[in-house]
């Protein structure tokens, strides 16, 4: 058993081994304002230039060019695409615009493919993903909104000959004048077949990889044929994440062999929710940061009405997903969709993105290439352009961390709480056939870790306590730098190394708060430990106690409570007064260990982040989403903010800027209310950027 455990550890270390982060990303990608560019090879030069001029008028800086690479193209058709894309790239460069081409990684469409003799599936059946039951992952018709009636959607395996076919085409695109490639969702889609990644080539790769590391007594594992709670199945779930991460890295390497400056952009539709487990694509598994970034498809509560009918409470989940994206990407920039339905809800979503420091890809749900409104995009993108360093290139500051564990999501939450979990509300407040989900189990509430992490974020947002999300896998050691309080919400899975990291954090003076599930009771692959790996940190009797514990450990403090709070903290699923009582308790607990930098007096639905560009220039990012009255309305609010400066510094001046029509701009007065505490008042419609200029005392 000891030999097996050592081999398993070597296997896991190999899988998680990442190159040193260089974060080699040019400024145009760090501060992008992206808009869709719906193109077709028959476009004339005049049509191309006319569309580019429209995007220029909208203050777009990066074109997401969709020219038809989704289709099953023969060699002549692909070569025509190359010529056309060179023409688009050249026209964009003349206007000082960047261009990236949209290219699905593992899906190929054939229009009218149900009746045609030649389609990707019919010509290359050995390249197709297969589900765990052996069913090919191909479907026809309108099972997904992007697939036209009668069209074939074929999903390809990165473990077959398709991989080289795709990489060869990526290299040819990298040789064009384009600035990058937008790789659409390289996933194991569950539409045509569930739990794909069980085609013969994938099975062979899984067995070979596990055999090479001596698993299962040196024989390796045979791929599972059913969904079950077994070590074999859990190892396969983990392997699928790694398998797709390796494929993505192969794309990056292939592109950079031709053009080292070519940007590789991966569109991720699973964010922090359960979709990542079955789809396989998890942005936390990252092989390189070199000219590589994510664009996160952060969905709304409605696929047609976006966030128009979201509640104030529900919108905190949208904010959390943008903050999660920044936690995953760390030193690299984050791009993300800012889907909207109308300017009111779209402005709140855009504000949530830039408050978190995320570069927006503005579009009208569910169409990537459409805008909410040209005037809307021009106004917001012009504001972002004028303040890009403050908004998109200044790190957000926080002393509180919330731990997010992909392993716990996979090995605890899927078993206990099932799938989905993107939002809270499963009953649409209006007649909406495209509401995100309809079954109570679809909510994140039944998922211990996902629900607990969302509740933790919600309570901190409500308390105006800046925080960041620390992801595992990732680089938690680096992410813990500067953190004073760490929250572990039902984190059942902890590796030996992460457990030791948390112990060191507390031993050196940090405070850890664990809630819900006893932390560290599962190992790296979801097998049950005899006792919590953190039993000494919390002084758990026999390592299996579920009672509240408070323990001094070194210079720090470890606190555990079995209360998960996911239902209670969201008033829609509990008593409003009780929810506020718990949130106030969280605020007091954090305040006991972290001196509060922000004191905000305002109505419910105000979120504030802190950014520190230098010792002398700090920023406050203020988002007012109080207008989410189900449906959304305009709701300008007076807000009072007190900000605590670092010791030895005073506020010299305060300025504010906003993209809102008729919003407050320019210098605003402030008063000193304590040695390091300064108070200011302003009215915010949807978003305001506050610049504080500091001087030494």
Image (cartoon, rainbow, N blue to C red):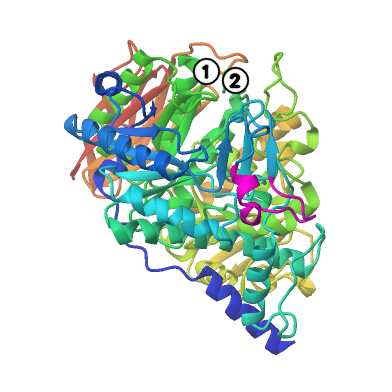
> In the shown orientation, is residue 564 left or right of residue 166?
right
Along the line of sight, the residue nearer the viewer: 150 or 262: 150
Q: Secondary structure at mark 2?
A: loop
Picture coordinates of residue 373, whole percent (x, y):
41, 14
Q: Secondary structure at mark 1?
A: loop
Residue occupying image coordinates x 79% and y 33%: 440
Q: Is residue 277 magenta?
A: no
Picture coordinates of residue 319, whole percent (x, y):
52, 35
Q: Is residue 602 above or below residue 140?
A: above
Residue occupying image coordinates x 45% and y 42%: 103
Q: Is residue 1 above or below residue 514?
A: below
Tell me the chief SS of the magenta region.
loop
Q: Separation of disc 2 and disc 1 at Cα?
A: 7 Å
* Residue 341's disc number: 1
Q: Which quadrant does the N terminus fall into?
A: bottom right
Q: Residue 133: which quarter of the image? A: bottom right
- Does label 2 or label 1 sit earlier along the sequence? 2
Contact? badges 2 and 1 (CB < 8 Å): yes
> In the shown orientation, is residue 413 left or right of residue 60?
right
Q: Is residue 519 above or below residue 29?
A: below
Mark 2, other Cα within 10 Å: few <14 / some 14–19 / many ≥20 = many
Q: Which quadrant does the C terminus fall into?
A: top left
Q: Is residue 130 magenta?
A: yes
* Residue 49's disc number: none
Picture coordinates of residue 489, whole percent (x, y):
65, 52
Boundaries of the magenta span: 119-137
Mark 1, other Cα within 10 Å: few <14 / some 14–19 / many ≥20 = many
Disc 2 marks which residue? Answer: 304
> In the shown orientation, is residue 426 left or right of residue 316?
right
Along the line of sight, the residue nearer the viewer: 629 or 281: 281
């Amino acid at each position: 058993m000891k030999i097996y455990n050592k081999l398993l550890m070597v296997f896991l270390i190999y899988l998680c081994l990442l190159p040193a982060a260089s974060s080699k990303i040019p400024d145009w990608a760090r501060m992008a304002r992206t808009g869709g560019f719906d193109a077709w090879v028959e476009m004339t030069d005049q049509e191309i230039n006319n569309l580019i001029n429209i995007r220029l008028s909208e203050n777009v800086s990066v074109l997401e060019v969709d020219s038809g690479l989704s289709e099953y193209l023969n060699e002549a058709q692909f070569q025509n695409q190359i010529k056309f894309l060179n023409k688009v790239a050249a026209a964009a460069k003349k206007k000082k615009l960047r261009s990236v081409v949209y290219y699905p990684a593992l899906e190929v469409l054939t229009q009218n493919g149900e009746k045609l003799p030649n389609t990707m599936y019919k010509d290359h059946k050995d390249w197709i993903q297969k589900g765990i039951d052996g069913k090919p992952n191909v479907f026809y018709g309108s099972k997904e909104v992007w697939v036209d009636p009668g069209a074939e959607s074929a999903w390809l395996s990165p473990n077959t000959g398709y991989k080289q076919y795709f990489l060869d085409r990526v290299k040819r695109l990298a040789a064009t004048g384009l600035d990058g490639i937008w790789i659409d969702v390289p996933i194991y889609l569950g539409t045509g077949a569930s739990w794909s990644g069980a085609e013969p080539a994938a099975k062979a790769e899984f067995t070979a990889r596990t055999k090479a590391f001596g698993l299962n007594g040196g024989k390796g594992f045979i791929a599972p044929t059913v969904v079950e709670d077994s070590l074999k199945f859990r190892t396969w779930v983990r392997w699928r994440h790694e398998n797709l991460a390796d494929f993505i890295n192969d794309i990056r390497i292939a592109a950079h062999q031709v053009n080292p400056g070519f940007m590789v952009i991966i569109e991720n539709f699973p964010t922090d929710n359960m979709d990542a487990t079955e789809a396989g694509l998890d942005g936390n598994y990252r092989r390189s940061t070199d000219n590589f970034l994510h664009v996160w498809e952060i969905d709304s509560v409605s696929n047609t009405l976006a966030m128009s009918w979201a509640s104030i409470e529900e919108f905190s989940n949208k904010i959390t997903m943008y903050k999660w994206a920044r936690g995953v990407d760390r030193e690299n920039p984050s791009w993300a969709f800012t889907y909207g339905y109308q300017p009111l809800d779209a402005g709140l979503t855009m504000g949530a993105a830039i408050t978190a420091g995320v570069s927006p890809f503005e579009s009208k749900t569910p169409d990537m290439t459409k805008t909410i409104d040209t005037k809307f995009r021009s106004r917001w993108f012009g504001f972002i352009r004028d303040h890009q360093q403050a908004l998109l290139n200044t790190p957000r500051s926080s002393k509180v961390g919330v731990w997010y564990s992909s392993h716990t999501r996979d090995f605890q939450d899927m078993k206990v709480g099932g799938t989905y979990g993107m939002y809270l509300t499963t009953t649409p407040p209006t007649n909406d056939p495209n509401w995100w989900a309809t079954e109570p189990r679809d909510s994140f509430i039944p998922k211990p870790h996902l629900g607990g992490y969302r509740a933790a974020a919600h309570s901190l947002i409500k308390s105006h306590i800046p925080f960041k999300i620390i992801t595992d896998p990732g680089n938690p050691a680096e992410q813990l730098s500067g953190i004073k309080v760490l929250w572990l919400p039902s984190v059942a899975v902890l590796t030996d190394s992460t457990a030791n990291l948390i112990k060191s954090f507390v031993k050196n003076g940090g405070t850890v708060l664990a809630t819900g599930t006893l932390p560290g009771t599962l190992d790296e692959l979801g097998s049950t430990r005899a006792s919590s790996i953190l039993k000494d940190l919390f002084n758990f009797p026999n390592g299996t106690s579920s009672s509240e514990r408070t323990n001094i450990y070194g210079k720090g403090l470890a606190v555990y409570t079995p209360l998960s709070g996911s239902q209670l903290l969201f008033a829609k699923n509990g008593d409003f007064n009780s929810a506020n009582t718990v949130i106030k308790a969280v605020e007091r607990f954090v305040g006991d260990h972290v001196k509060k930098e922000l004191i905000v007096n305002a109505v419910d639905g105000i979120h504030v982040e802190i950014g520190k560009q230098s010792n002398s220039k700090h920023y406050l990012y203020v988002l007012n989403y109080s207008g989410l009255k189900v449906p959304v309305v305009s709701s300008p609010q007076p807000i009072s903010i007190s900000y605590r400066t670092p010791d030895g510094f005073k506020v010299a001046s305060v300025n504010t800027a906003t993209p809102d029509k008729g919003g407050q701009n320019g210098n605003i007065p402030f008063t000193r209310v304590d040695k390091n505490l300064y108070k200011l008042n302003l009215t915010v419609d949807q978003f305001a950027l506050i610049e504080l200029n500091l001087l030494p005392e």
